[in-house]
Structure formats: C-alpha cells, structure tokens
Amino acid sequence: MRIIVLALMLALALGTAQATPLQGGDGNATVVLFGATRTPLEDENATQEILKVDVGLMGAENATYQLVDDHNNIYLPGLYKPLSSGKQTVYFLTTKDSLFKLLNVTPAGGKPIYINWWATPKGSNDRMVLRYYGITDWLINPDEQGIVVQVRVQNNGTQKLIVSPENFTLMDQWGWPYRPTLGFDPEIVEPQKPTSRVLLGFTGISLLSRPVALAYDYGASNQIVILFERDYVPLSDELVYGANATKSAAAIVPAPAAVLPTSNPAAQNVAVPVPANETKETKKLSIKDKLAASKARLAATKVSLDKKTPDTNVTANTSSNASNSSSSISTGL
C-alpha cells in the first residue's frame, strides 16, 4: 500500500512538471530545442556516438547548426531528418560521453542564434549526489520499449556507500515504476568520491509509457527523485561564456559556409569530419551507414535483454575519461 501511495503522489507531482524546451530567435526566425538522446555505434570500443537533437524551426525554411562541447570543440551535423510542421531531427557524430554547452543555429538569410545547452540534472540527500546524463540508447519493437540511461553517484558522506542497479527506479508519466534489467556490478564508493558513469537498462516498458523521472532508493525516507522535465534547465551564461563574457563572445564561433535545406533529400547524407585516430575503413562510412549498423546492433541487444532477468544483471560497458569525471564538469555542466 505504501508503494502505491508513493506512486500516486509521484504521479501528481509529475503532472505539474512543466517541459523546458530551449528557445532562441533573431527577430524573424525562432528555434526550439525539445530534447536530445544518444545512440552508441556498433563497435563497443568506438570513441564516438550519435547525438540526435529534436529541433523546431519557425520563420525560416532551413538553417545550419553547430554544437559546442565543454572543451570548445565544434561538431557539425552529419544528417538531417525532416519531420512535420517545421520539426526535424538533427544528427551529430560526437565524442562519446561529451558534455555540451552551446548550439549555434544560423537560419537561412538570418543572424546566428546562440542557445545555451541543458545543465546536467542532479538530486541529492545527506549522503550522496545523483547526476543524470540522459538516455544513451532507446530500443523499440511492436510490443515494448527498452531504455538505457547513464548516471553517476557522488558519495558526500563519511562512510563507504554501496551502489548497485537495484537502487534505481525509472518512472513513467503515470508514476509507474520500472526496475533495471541491465546494469553494472555493485560498487563500493569511498567517502567524497564518485563512481564512474554507469549505464542502467530498463526493458518491458509499455509503448504508451513516457520516461519522466529516475529515482534512487525509491520509497525510502531519503529517496532522490530527478524529474526530467522540471530538472532540465539551461546552463547559465557564466558557465557557457565565462565569468566576464557575454553572448557576444559566441560570435567567434565560425559559421559553416553551406546552408543545407531540410527539405532536400540529397542533404541528408552529409560528410562528417573524422578524427585522425579512426581507421581508413571507418572513414569510408557515412553517418547513415553507422546508423544502419547501430539499428542492427540494437535489434541484437533487444534479443539479449529479453533473456535476462533482474537477478542476472551483467556489467554495462561505458566510457568515462578523466575530463568527464573532473570536479569542474561535475559542478558545472
């Protein structure tokens, strides 16, 4: 009964949560960012992943896009997927586990529009801080969904903390709880230390369900609940441009020369700059080829997940470099 009451209370809280799309304009055109998800490539050892950004464009036929990460690296789109009513999905091939701070959008014939990216949602209690890095994989078949998310736990207490997949619960818009079916090996976290970024997989999710919250120790008196829509807020100008800078500083980011029409099918397979450490064979693959390979891998992963139960968790591989684990990233983005 207690769990049912908590679920109902959470559902009521989620019902009042407001979506926080990011928006900018140049006086003529308006750009709205509704969300972003990441998809891994087929190669488990790949140093890149696909970032899919849901964008709405009004007042212009098309635009160019540049994504800037926390190290000021610039990413150009590799694929545009037109949707309906001015919406599209913009695909970027990015360094794995990157954190982003700025999207530069230049409408055709218009001025650059600079939109601060989302800050990393977090929640805390007297023992720990939970950071949520978003959806890293989304598997859908005709009967159900599978969702993989990435998190990190910081032990802020004075005693060791044991963290395992069983500590986490994913909630849909009705407050219905889902437990992980894929996760990581339990970790003992020393005081004042964080875990690496770890993956949590949830399967058997209804097609009608929409993930809206992640809870740690759900139902306990000191539970932590991150509400995705409420807790996704834009980064401050200080974090994006520096303490003494303003948005005018973003003008130093160069705009690409070509404007790629969203309605032009030929523009949907755009070459992406390839890092020097990639092989010649990898360079020959367009991002569309990599997407096709990723879909095949997702289908194989779904078969594997169906064979697992919460009692047979396996270790989830994740990549976390030193810069992504630094205290400046933890407290900034």
Image: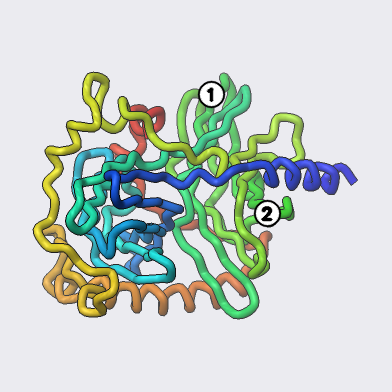
User: What is the number of the mark on residue 173?
Assistant: 2
Label 1: element kind: loop
Q: Quadrant of the C terminus?
A: top left
C-alpha span from label 2 to label 1: 30 Å
Q: Does residue 262 lie above or below 169 as drawn? A: below
Q: Residue at x 30, y 52 (%)?
A: 29
What is the crowding at mark 1: few (fewer than 14 residues within 10 Å), some, or many (at least 20)? many
Q: Earlier in the sequence, mark 2 or mark 1?
A: 1
**Residue 317, position as x, y percentages in the image:** 43, 57
Residue named by callout 1: 156
The picture quadrant where one finds residue 100 is top left
Q: Residue at x 39, y 58 (%)?
A: 56
Residues 191 and 70: in front is 70
Label 2: element kind: loop
Identity, as a three-letter code, of the amino acid under mark 1? Asn
User: What is the number of the mark on residue 143?
Assistant: none
Identity, as a three-letter code, of the amino acid under mark 2? Gln
Q: Residue at x 57, y 33 (%)?
A: 123
Q: Is residue 228 visible?
A: no
How many numbered marks are there?
A: 2
**Residue 135, position as x, y percentages in the image:** 48, 55
Render colour scheme: rainbow
Q: Does residue 315 lie above or below 240 as drawn? A: below
Residues 111 and 99: in front is 111
